[in-house]
Structures are given as structure tokens and as C-alpha cells.
Image: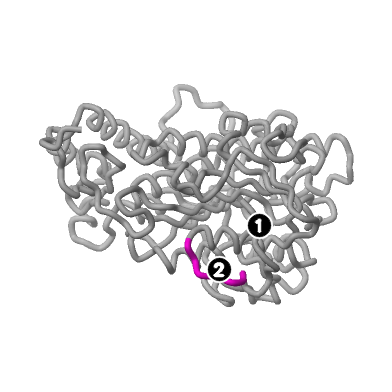
Amino acid sequence: MANNWQVSRRTMLRGLGVSLALPWLESVQQTANAASPGGPPLRFLAVFQPNGVYPKEWDVSGVGRDFSLSTILEPLAPVKDDIVVVSQLDNVGTQGHVQMTGSFLTGSAMDGMTNAPSLDQMLARKVGGETQLPFVVLGTEPPRQGAAGNNPISFANTVSWHSASTRVNPEINPRVAFDRMFRSQTSPEARRRNLDRKSVVDLVLEDARSLKSQVSSLDRHKIDEYLASVRSVEERIDRTLNPPKKSWVPPTQPELTRPADGIPAERDKHLQLMIDLMVLAFQTDTTRVGTLMTAHGFSRQSFSFLDGVTSDHHGMSHHKNQDSAVAEYTTVSRWYIEMFSGMLQRMKSIDEGSGSLLDNTIVMYGSGMKDGNGHVRENLPIVLAGRGQGRLDTGRHIVCKEHTPLANLLLTLGQRMDLELDSMNGASTGTIEL
């Protein structure tokens, strides 16, 4: 690389009331960070899927590197070498969805409305001071009302707990999430800009043009690709919340209940937006700790957009081994994995110089229960992804000792992320060889 066109420590594109973090560029002498001196930072992402899976369609065959993906996990084939399937981990709690959701990142059984700090929040306290946002928690469903045993159902809307008594509610509005990441909300310029609803990309274009004149041709392409990605998210938010006029309008209209402002009506589009926002948050180093609730832990969402699916997700999870319900249940579980695989492939495509974004991340995907039929808490469906800058040996199926606590995995991941932990909320019995 020719040093005469390096731009020293340039990390932001700036515009009126806007600072947009740059992706990794070979021409820019990026600021070193404590996690990986001289290179990109290490990130952690937790992805939660509700209502479990049908075990026979999830469980993989083979151990170690000689394993075959199951029906549900088959969409992960393009990234098989970047994942670790972990079997024989058990959750705690016996009261169903709320407890099993709450313990997903704490490893600890909820006691009424009390839990314990979650792994993502522990990590945010360690590394959060280095980024604009200490953590990002995104979701797709608001809290629900009612109770399940001694636990409010509303508590199943998150797996992220700041403390034993304080849960972190996910942001489910894509535009609000985007603005928190990339827009100043308080300055006079920001208020004027919000009135005009100008694109973040448009506001930083002049600075981007100036920077592009100083960098390599490869980096010019990378800046264009990055800005196109940001603009794509903006445009999809706008289209979702303000759909264009149609060329044909049906002569009759059914009675409609207007959804909450700002929340996309289409299930697949909503989740894809939140996935894209999470990837952008990591790519721009807006945060290094993320948690994505693909849905509420007691989700009754409809998946009628999938062929052959007519039941709500919670309903089909109580399948009673009936073929039709099992087929729907498996279709939905596979769809979630398809979305997850797409996210991993996108992360793998983002070059950060020292590996890809996926190489520089530890991702934990799974559900708080194995099978919704009976609220089975043994042998949870768990997949890890990303090499974590060499902290994970991927491309394997790990079978733990039977009845290993989920807390052991959380403790292991915390230690791999440089947390000084000897125990995970008093619930772990040791670590796992990853």
C-alpha cells in the first residue's frame, strides 16, 4: 500500500448534525482499540428465537467436523465452516416461556420479576465506553400483557437484563433505531433536518466526496457500497412506513385496524430491517455488543406468508406430535434459520482488513427451550457463529456432557470476550471446550 494516500485516523463522515462512522478502509490509518490493537474490534451478538423447535428436525448427525446439517439447519450450508452447533445444554426454570426466555443470557432462573445481569450487559459495561452506543437491543414485538405463573408475560419480550431488577426493552421501531444510531436528536440542525427528512447519506455526501479523492480505488468502491447499504435501509424504512401509491385499488376494502405508528406490518420485512440495522451498527462501530429478539419469547405471530402455515407460532409449538402442526412448526423454524444464515453471509462479505465482520464477531443463536410441546428445557437448540478473532474453532458439532447448564456456555463466551468471570451468576458448573 502506498503511504502517500493514507488518511490518518479518519473514522467519520460528517454532515449537518450527522456523524456516520466509516467501515474499514485500507487507505485509512484507523485508531487502535483495546480489544484488538491495530485492527478491528471484537464484537458479540446474541440472537434469540422464541418457542423452540421440533427436535427431530433440528438435531444434527455426526460429531466434531464430521457432521451433517438437519432439515432446519440446512440453510446454514453456505456458512457451515463458520458455525458451531452445540448440543446437550440445559436451561433452568420450569414455568415455561417467560422463565426460559429470561434465562437465555443470564443462565439464572427468574424469581417472580427478579433475574440477574445478562451476558450482553456485562460485556457492554466492559467495552461500551469505546463506542457511541454501549449496546444495541433490537426486536420485533412489544411486551404482551398477562401473567404466566409468577412471571409477567411482558418480561418475555427481552433476554437482556441490566441488573437483577432492570430488563432492557428492545427497540422495535426501525426508524427510531436508525435515528438513535446515526442522527443527533437534540441540536437545532437535527430538528430542522428531521422536518425536512433528509437522508443521512445525502447529508454526508460532500464529506464523502472529499474523502474519496484521498483514498485508493478499492476504498472508493467500498465507500460507495457502504453508503448504498445505509441508503437502502433508509429507503426500505420509508417504503414500509409510507408505502407508494398503487396503480390499482380494490373496489371494496375490508375493515382494517391501523397498526402502531412506525412498525412494519409485514413480519419478514420487519425482521430483515432489524437484521440489517444490527449489521450496520457493527459495521460502523456504533456498538460492539448487540442483542436481537427475532420475536417475543411468548410469540403468537402469524406466518401465513409462508406456504402451508396457518397457525400462530405459539400454537403450532404445542404440536402434540400431529403431523400438520409439526410441519408448520418446522417451516417456521427453518425460516428463522434462513434469516439468520442471510445475516451471517452478509457479515462474512464485509471486509475489515483483518478478516471479515463475521470473523471479528462471536454470535450466539438459539432458543430458551428445546421443544414448545411440553416446554422442554433440555438439550437446547444453540448455534454459535464467527471465529471471534480466533477465540472460536468453527465448523464443528460439539456434544457436551448430558445436562450441562446453559450458564456454562455463557461463562465460556464471557471469558473468551475477556470478561473476568469465575461464575455466571452462580449458575455455572464450569466451562466448555470451544
| Residue at 49% from the left image edge and 48% from the top image edge | 388
Residue 6, above or below 49:
above
Q: Which residue is mark 2?
A: 161
Tag 1 near tag 2, CB within 8 Å = no
Total numbered labels: 2
Q: Secondary structure at mark 2?
A: strand
Span colored in magenta? 418-424
Q: Nearer the viewer, residue 195 or 342?
A: 342
- Tell me the CA gap for discs 1 and 2: 23 Å
| Residue at 35% from the left image edge and 66% from the top image edge | 129
Amino acid found under the numbered disc labelled 1: Ile
Where residue 123 sits: x, y (%)?
Answer: 47, 64
Q: Which residue is mark 1?
A: 432
Instruction: Say whether residue 99 is left or right of residue 249.
Output: right
Is residue 145 visible in the rendered image? The answer is no
Amino acid found under the numbered disc labelled 2: Trp
| Residue at 70% from the left image edge and 64% from the top image edge | 98
| Main secondary structure of the magenta stretch | loop
In which quarter of the view is residue 146 placed?
Answer: bottom right
| Residue at 16% from the left image edge and 47% from the top image edge | 8
Residue 366, above or below 305:
below
Instruction: Say whether residue 194 is left or right of residue 258.
Output: left
First in sequence: mark 1 or mark 2? 2
The tag on residue 354 is none
